[in-house]
Image (cartoon, rainbow, N blue to C red):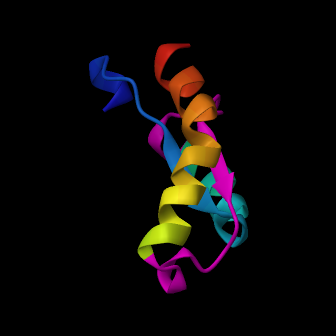
């Protein structure tokens, strides 16, 4: 999406950071720095936990989308 001028913010859990770092250059995103790191295992969070997590990263997400 970013190659088409659409700002993005990639939200990933900690164990996936190395995968993103190694994959980004293969798709022409060597300088990709828009990752937002969250604790692993969000799949087990309830709605309230996910809301709190989203609230905790909203400012960082806005920065990624408007940088």
Q: Which residues make up the magenta segment? A: 25-46
Q: Is residue 42 visible?
A: yes
Horizontal relation, residue 22 to residue 64: left or right = right
Determine which quarter of the picture holds residue 57: top right
Figure check: 13 above or below 35: below
Q: Residue at x 35, y 25 (%)?
A: 3
Q: From this viewpoint, which residue is outermost toward the bottom?
A: 44
Q: How many marks?
A: 0
**12 or 61, which is in the foreground?**
61
Horizontal relation, residue 66 to residue 32: left or right = left
**1 or 30, which is in the foreground?**
1
Query: Where does residue 53 sit, x and y in percent of width and height?
Result: 59, 57
Which quadrant: the N terminus? top left
Horizontal relation, residue 9 to residue 41: left or right = left
Query: Quick check: is 45 in the magenta stretch?
Result: yes
Figure check: 42 above or below 33: below
Q: Is residue 32 visible?
A: no
Query: Quick check: is 32 in the magenta stretch?
Result: yes
Q: Residue at x 49, y 14 (%)?
A: 66
């Amino acid at each position: 999406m970013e190659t088409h001028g659409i700002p993005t913010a990639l939200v990933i859990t900690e164990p996936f950071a190395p995968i993103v770092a190694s994959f980004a250059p293969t798709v022409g995103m060597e300088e990709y720095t828009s990752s937002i790191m969250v604790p692993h295992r969000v799949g087990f969070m309830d709605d309230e936990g996910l809301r709190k997590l989203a609230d905790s990263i909203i400012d960082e997400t806005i920065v990624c989308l408007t940088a």
